[in-house]
Image (cartoon, rainbow, N blue to C red):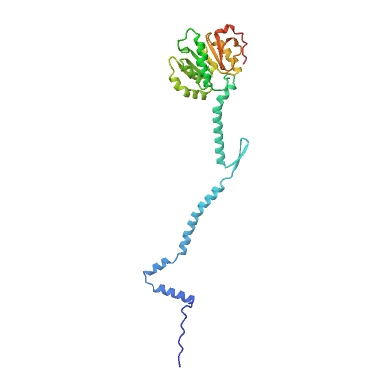
Amino acid sequence: AVRPLPRRPHPHARRPAAHAHVRARESLGDMAPAEAPVAALAQPDVGAAAAVAPPVAALLAEPAAAAAEGAGGPPKKKVNFLGMSISAREETAKKLLIGAGAVLLLVNGIGIPFVVPRLTARYVGAPYLPMKRNAVDVLFERVLPTWAASRSSHLPGQPLAGLRLLDFGAGDGRVVAAAASRGMRAVGYEVNPWLVLWSRLRTRPTLAMAPAPGSGELRWANAWDADFRDVDVLTVYGIPGVMDRCAEKCEAELPPHAVVVSHHFDVPGWERMLVADIEGLKLYDLSRRSQLRRREPVVE
């Protein structure tokens, strides 16, 4: 009898899964000892990966947590400042309050010297107003030289040299500097420390080059405490209330040959002593004091 031939599997037929695992184990068993570690390294170690994953995940989670904490931050607080409600965190609110306090101190430190002379009787005076350059030139080129030329003691060509000038409220020091540059010995009184500092810096070059016997000094002092007994020329810029008090002090202390120059404002009761009025600069000659009417004392 003819025996049937065995059927061969189709080349594209899929082998059973069990046969595949058996052949894989047989293949590993047939490998040489040197090739076994390489195959072991090729297999992924699931346990080791699980051991390494948690620290990496923790490291990645820390920046995210920090960012979330910074985004939320501490709770904001409401701060009332000058009637305004400001919402800010505690640290920011502290910085705002400290900065506002520093600004207020700075403003008060600069502004108080300008306000005090208008509030207290001891330092009362006119507000600071710089004298125009044209007015300074008129004072030292027309008003004072015309008066000084009539004096027998003046030097030829230098009518103002050697005369003593007192500036009642020196401001920025331009009157003192102009007087010193013409040979006068000038002193300015100013109660505002910021103006004194500025005037000293501003006039230093001019005073350093003053011709002899000219000199200039700017004092941080109250002009009401100044001594008028050795003054030849007194310059003043004052408001009506100040001029009454200044006139009383001038009458009591200035020598008979002295003159007073008031910028813009009249001196009450001195009408008969007015000898020149040029562009708002009024010169009063105290040598005519005999013509002065009796003044009533000023009540403070």
203 displayed left or right of 128? left
- The image quarter in which residue 130 lies: top right
Q: Is residue 117 above or below residue 273?
A: below
User: Quick one: quadrant of the N terminus?
Assistant: bottom left
User: Quick one: quadrant of the C terminus?
Assistant: top right
Q: How many marks?
A: 0
18 or 170: nearer the viewer: 170
- Residue occupying the point 51% across, 12% down: 146
178 or 248: nearer the viewer: 178
Report x, y in % for residue 178.
Answer: 48, 18
193 or 38: nearer the viewer: 193
Q: Is residue 37 above or below residue 239?
A: below
Report x, y in % for residue 127.
Answer: 57, 22
Is residue 35 at least partly visible in the picture? yes
Report x, y in % for residue 214.
Answer: 45, 15
Is residue 227 at least partly visible in the picture? no
23 displayed left or right of 84? left
143 displayed left or right of 84? left
Q: Is residue 45 above or below residue 249?
A: below
- Residue occupying the point 60% across, 11% down: 271
Report x, y in % for residue 170.
Answer: 52, 20
- Residue occupying the point 57% across, 39% down: 93
- Outermost residue toward the top in this view: 290
